[in-house]
Amino acid sequence: MIIATANSCTHPPRRPFRAGGEISPAGRTKTAPPPRARVDSLAFAFVSCQNWYEGYYTTYRHLAQEDLDVLFHLGDYLYAHGVGPTGGVRGIALPEQYLKETFTLTGYRNRHALYRTDTDLQATHAAFPWMVTVDDHDVENNFSQIDTEPDQDRQIFLQRRAAAFQAFYEHMPLRRSALPWGAGMRLYRRQAFGRLAAFSVLDTRQYRDDQPCGDGEKAGCAERLDPDRTMLGERQEAWLLDSLGRSHTTWNILANQLLVAPLDHDAAPDVQSFGMDLWDGYAAARDRLLTGMVQRRMRNPVVISGDIHRSLAAELTTNFDDPNAPVMGVEFAGTSVSSGKDGADQDRIGQIFMRANPHLKFHNVQRGYVRAKATPDTLTVDYQVVPYVSRPGAPVSTRACFAVEAGRPGLHQTADNPPVGVRFVPDVAGPLDHLAEQSAR
């Protein structure tokens, strides 16, 4: 359902409709208040990365029970590569068409249809409005502009991207302005909720330069520092900075696929290693973005991101090499719904991340979602996690809570949560609870 504009936030039912001889179930949505309306609170959540065969959508079962004004999906709604003959952990025999990587419009349509068979995902679509964008796996792993896999013809890739975008548009709540034209699709847009908050939904795939130094994780890659490199493309970057400069909302939130904060993968103090697909591979573009926010005196900048299959909370500055640089904003990265399988509270890579990146304040590798509530004074953010997705029925728990005060950039932990993965607190973890009842599927 599209977010409409009304005089106040309302909860109209969504009427059933008939398609292909079938009648849809009824759902609920909400309409957004006018841009200059006074709004006392906004409840939202965000998710990403829902590989169908790597886990059950228990996250969505819990998420559908939340009272939200809007849900953001930050990409990887589906995975274009082959599913496997038994549906992974789901143990469902699938027709041959699902066993191979998809390239055609029919293939992408069928992949969307497969994912939509999950009743927990259906329930979440019916519970509240969604705002969506694509990430790489919705089309092809780590694609950028017209760059393709080495063994793939450029024209074949453009046809593939056109097919993926068309299927995405057909299955997602998008306005007509997002109607694909060939291999292109306008996904970046802005949505305000009165004077309280505005979300800039970004597209970090379609206009970016190719990943530097051959992609992957690299140390000493000078190409990533090239000032001419772009993540958003010239037009989207100009649109974003212009709209942020004219914003009058209390909270200005960037809904973005990829982690903006630097993520050094090497614990050695004299070595830095970064993932070239992240904003780390586009360091100058990141500098323009963060510096541009400061120069435009943007109020209360917040970034929400997905992709990484981990929960991270970070403080943002315009100079991450200076430990005394003032904090100018915060970032909340959400874990996956199911991609990466069960996960854990902490792992070796996460421990390296926490040691090598002092701006990180929290890390966790379980599956789940992030919920948030904005008021004129505070933004509160809760990391909701489930202990497993390899079988249905997992309970949900709050792993960490943070607050950001309006006018005072920085993260403040607000609850007495288990301290594993939280900076400045002893590394002590309790055992995971695997004793939840198994729900019937």
Image (cartoon, rainbow, N blue to C red):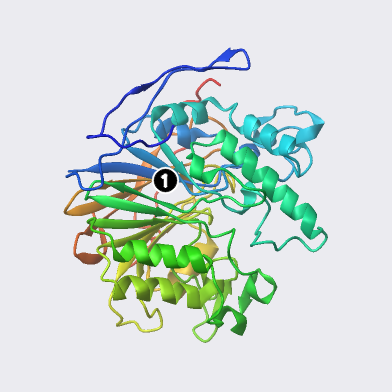
Which residue is located at x 62 percent, y 52 percent?
184
Secondary-structure class at tag 1 = strand
Q: Where is residue 221 shown, x and y percent of the image?
A: 61, 81
Q: Label 1 is placed on what type of residue?
A: Phe
Which residue is located at x 47 percent, y 37 percent?
59
Q: Which residue is mark 1?
A: 46
Rendered view: 246 above or below 380: below
Rendered view: 82 above or below 227: above
Rendered view: 162 above or below 279: above
Question: Observer-nearest residue: 99 or 227?
Answer: 227
Q: Where is residue 282 shown, x and y percent of the image?
A: 54, 73
Q: Where is residue 39 shown, x and y percent of the image?
A: 19, 43
Which residue is located at x 36 percent, y 39 percent?
70
User: How many numbered marks, from 0 up?
Assistant: 1
Question: Observer-nearest residue: 33 or 231?
Answer: 33
Q: Quadrant of residue 45?
A: top left
Quadrant holding the N terminus: top left
Quadrant holding the C terminus: top right
